[in-house]
Amino acid sequence: MRKLTYLAVFEPSDDGYGVYFPDLPGCITWGDSFLSAEAAAKEALGLHLYGMEKDGEALPTPAASPVLDPETAPGALVSPVTVFPDVVRNEMDNRRVKTNITIPAWLKELAEQNGVNYSRLLETALMDCLGLNQQPHQVP
């Protein structure tokens, strides 16, 4: 299982810590305490890497030492943040999402009278239609 570690910069402020990753422009977050900023940094890193891979972008090699933004606040801390990209990808790809469908009113009423679970029915029908097995889809 892949494990990636990037250095994060935790900038103190009056209301918590801002976080950015010098190797990953645009990957930023915040927390009202160091611990909450650390947890937010892990989530932001995982989602940022997931998005990059989904878009076909190459992940940058983590730097051995960070190049801080010249405007970094005094007292900033640098700390490694580790994620498992395959775990994040599996969680994101298998999360439940809402979708709307349109069916005739009489069919909806009959289905509700018979206790039909629309989500289960649609999921099963789509998997059957696409020739997938009935087990939850796991990302290889």
Image (cartoon, rainbow, N blue to C red):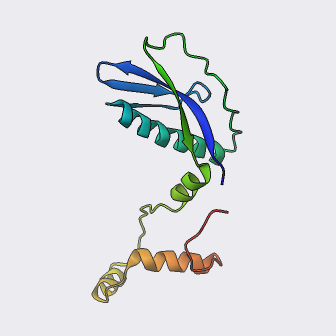
Give the left or right position of residue 135, taking residue 106 as reference.
right
The residue sitting at 30% across, 83% down in the picture is: 112
Residue 63 placement (x, y as % from top left): 67, 27
Residue 96 found in image quarter: bottom left
Viewer-closest of 50 and 101:
50
Location of residue 103 with respect to 85 vertically, above or below:
below
**Which of the pair 12/135 is nearer the observer?**
12
Q: Residue at x 49, y 11 (%)?
A: 71
Between residue 116 and residue 23, name the one nearer to us.
Answer: 23
Residue at the spot 65% in from the left edge and 45% down from the top edge:
53
Image-quadrant location for residue 115:
bottom left
Compared across the picture, whether 17 is left or right of 25 comes to left
The quadrant of the rendering that contains the C terminus is bottom right
The x and y percentages for residue 54 are 63, 48
x, y (%) of residue 34?
A: 37, 30
Expressed as whole percent of the image width and height from the top left, the position of residue 101 reads 42, 69
Q: Quadrant of the N terminus?
A: bottom right
At 40% from the left and 33% from the top, the residue drawn is 37
